[in-house]
């Protein structure tokens, strides 16, 4: 087994747990549908977190050519998957028990932490490029990172519900454009 195959197991487990976290949240909402107050941005962000986790896993294939893994390099890559898991843990509420599940209330109670962890993912992604490649991403990728930073910071600072509804729609468009522009094909 080569180093990448060995190290990618832990990364895959954490990303799998992130996806599981969101899917369990959706399962809980389906089971609690009669006592759930819907708020569509929560649903949108839940789907986007799954897409982000899959995109992170998809791009990790590009690291298979790294032969000299150091603990620092691996730690930075690992940190991004941990931040992805934490975003997943905040995306949807725990719908167990008999209490009403108010998605809007959940969203605004956790929005600062949620967007702070999104920001962490983006910043660690930039750090990862510096540590792994020795340089920042190419200009197109770097531009997307800038947009994600602005999206995350504004989600932390601005609390207006209409803004957050627009932010969820923007998140969908931005992530779709990011993947469509840079990650349609597996990096060979």
Image (tube, rainbow, N blue to C red):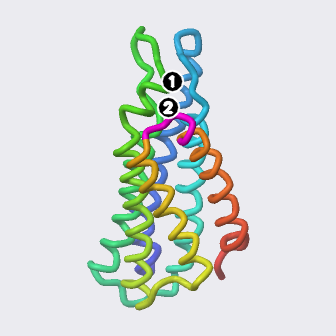
131 displayed left or right of 102: left
Numbered label attached to residue 25 = 2
188 displayed left or right of 153: right
Task: Specify whether residue 14 is in view.
Answer: no
Residue 42 in the magenta stretch? The answer is: no
The local crowd at label 2, few if under 14, some if 14 to 19, many if 20 or more residues have their Cα within 10 Å, is many
Q: Is the C-beta separation of discs 1 and 2 under 8 Å?
A: yes
Numbered label attached to residue 81 = none
Height in image: 51 above or below 60? above
**Relative depth, front residue between 15 and 106:** 106
The kind of secondary structure the magenta stretch mainly shows is helix
138 displayed left or right of 69: right
**Relative depth, front residue between 162 and 69:** 162
Q: Which residues are magenta?
A: 159-163
> Horizontal and vertical percent for residue 91?
46, 39
- Residue 142 figure quarter: bottom right
Numbered label attached to residue 28 = 1
> Horizontal and vertical percent for residue 154?
45, 53
Secondary structure under badge 2?
A: helix
- Residue 120 figure quarter: bottom left
Residue at image position (47%, 33%) is 92
């Amino acid at each position: 087994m080569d180093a990448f195959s060995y190290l990618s197991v832990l990364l895959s487990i954490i990303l799998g747990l992130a996806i599981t976290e969101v899917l369990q949240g959706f399962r809980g909402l389906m089971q609690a549908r009669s006592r759930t107050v819907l708020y569509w941005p929560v649903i949108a962000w839940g789907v986007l977190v799954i897409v982000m986790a899959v995109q992170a896993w998809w791009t990790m294939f590009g690291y298979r050519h790294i032969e000299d893994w150091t603990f620092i390099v691996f730690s930075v890559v690992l940190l991004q998957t941990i931040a992805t898991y934490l975003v997943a843990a905040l995306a949807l509420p725990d719908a167990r028990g008999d209490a009403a599940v108010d998605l809007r209330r959940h969203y605004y109670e956790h929005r600062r932490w949620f967007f702070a962890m999104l920001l962490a993912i983006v910043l660690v992604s930039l750090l990862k490029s510096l540590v792994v490649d020795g340089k920042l991403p190419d200009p197109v990728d770097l531009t997307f990172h800038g947009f994600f930073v602005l999206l995350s910071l504004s989600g932390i600072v601005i609390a207006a519900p209409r803004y957050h509804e627009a932010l969820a729609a923007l998140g969908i468009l931005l992530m779709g454009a990011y993947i469509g522009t840079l990650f349609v094909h597996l990096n060979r």
